[in-house]
């Protein structure tokens, strides 16, 4: 067992605890590391394998790589912002990222004191995400693929936060999460359809 890690049995218990979605407040670094390993999958391994870094340094390195890979995925959209379907592709990519990592992001937000360095990486990722999405939307608007935007920065924030809400917040920390159970795929379809109507209906 690593000095910062957890015994295999405890790891299994914590993993099960996470999948039951009981809490985003982890209280101590031991549980935090277990949750991090469970949620963040290694970009270098099969997706069925748990991300089990051997040290804090490796955890940091792989997390940095993960964020870089996510940014590269969105960068490919920027290259295609002059083509039909690029707006839908942007929305779908945001949903995919938040569906996969939303719980981890929320855990970082709720436990900021447990690993400040990881929190700083997350903040940098979010800032880059807002800036890049603003740039993508501006280019799409200039190319006539979405309606004219008065404040692209505000549109980017609204789109990102709405998708983040339905990908993670609603499931993990909304006030009535136990009373309103939504099919995630159907809700994803509904949100994308609404955003497309809002930003593209004038062009149809």
Image (cartoon, rainbow, N blue to C red):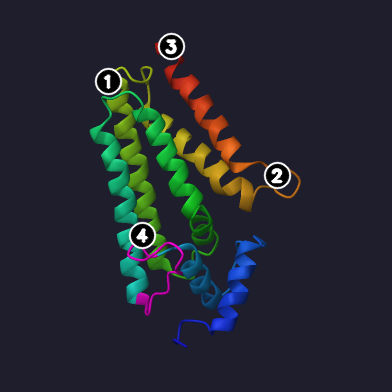
Q: Is residue 57 above or below residue 195?
A: below
Packing grade of label 3 (10 A; few <14, some 14-19, many >=20) is few
Residue 96 location (% of width, % of height): 45, 45
Image check: 169 left or right of 88? right
Packing grade of label 4 (10 A; few <14, some 14-19, many >=20) is some
Residue 48 location (% of width, % of height): 46, 64
As measured in the structure, the alpha-carbon distance from the residue carrying label 3 to the one carrying label 2 is 33 Å
Please identify the quadrant where the C terminus is shown: top left
Circle 1 sits on which residue?
142
As measured in the structure, the alpha-carbon distance from the residue carrying label 4 to the one carrying label 1 is 31 Å
Name the secondary structure under disc 3.
Answer: helix
Packing grade of label 1 (10 A; few <14, some 14-19, many >=20) is some
As measured in the structure, the alpha-carbon distance from the residue carrying label 4 to the one carrying label 2 is 32 Å
As measured in the structure, the alpha-carbon distance from the residue carrying label 1 to the one carrying label 3 is 15 Å
Name the secondary structure under disc 1.
Answer: helix
At x 58%, y 70%, the residue is 15
As measured in the structure, the alpha-carbon distance from the residue carrying label 4 to the one carrying label 3 is 39 Å
Whether pointer 3 and pointer 2 mark residues with C-beta atoms closer than 8 Å, the reply is: no
Circle 4 sits on which residue?
121
Residue 159 location (% of width, % of height): 46, 34
As measured in the structure, the alpha-carbon distance from the residue carrying label 2 to the one carrying label 1 is 39 Å
Foreground disc of the pair 4, 2: 2
Whether residue 48 appears in magenta in the rendering, the answer is yes
Give the extent of the magenta segment.
42-56
Reading the chain from its start, which is encountered first: label 4 or label 3? 4
Label annotation for residue 202: 3
| Residue 124 appears in the picture as rendered | yes
Q: Is residue 120 above or below residue 142?
A: below
| Residue 23 appears in the picture as rendered | no
């Amino acid at each position: 067992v690593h000095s910062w890690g957890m015994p295999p049995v405890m790891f299994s218990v914590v993993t099960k605890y996470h999948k039951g979605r009981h809490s985003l407040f982890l209280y101590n670094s031991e549980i935090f590391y277990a949750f991090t390993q469970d949620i963040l999958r290694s970009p270098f391994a099969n997706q069925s394998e748990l991300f089990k870094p051997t040290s804090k340094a490796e955890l940091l390195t792989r997390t940095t790589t993960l964020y870089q890979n996510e940014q590269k995925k969105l960068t490919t959209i920027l290259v295609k912002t002059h083509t039909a379907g690029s707006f839908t592709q942007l929305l779908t990519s945001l949903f995919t990222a938040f569906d996969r990592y939303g719980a981890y992001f929320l855990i970082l937000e709720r436990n900021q004191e447990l690993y400040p360095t990881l929190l700083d990486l997350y903040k940098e990722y979010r800032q880059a995400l807002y800036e890049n999405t603003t740039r993508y939307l501006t280019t799409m608007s200039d190319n006539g693929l979405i309606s004219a935007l008065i404040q692209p920065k505000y549109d980017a924030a609204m789109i990102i936060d709405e998708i983040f809400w339905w990908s993670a917040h609603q499931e993990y920390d909304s006030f009535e999460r136990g009373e309103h159970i939504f099919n995630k795929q159907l809700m994803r379809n509904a949100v994308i359809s609404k955003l497309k109507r809002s930003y593209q209906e004038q062009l149809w």
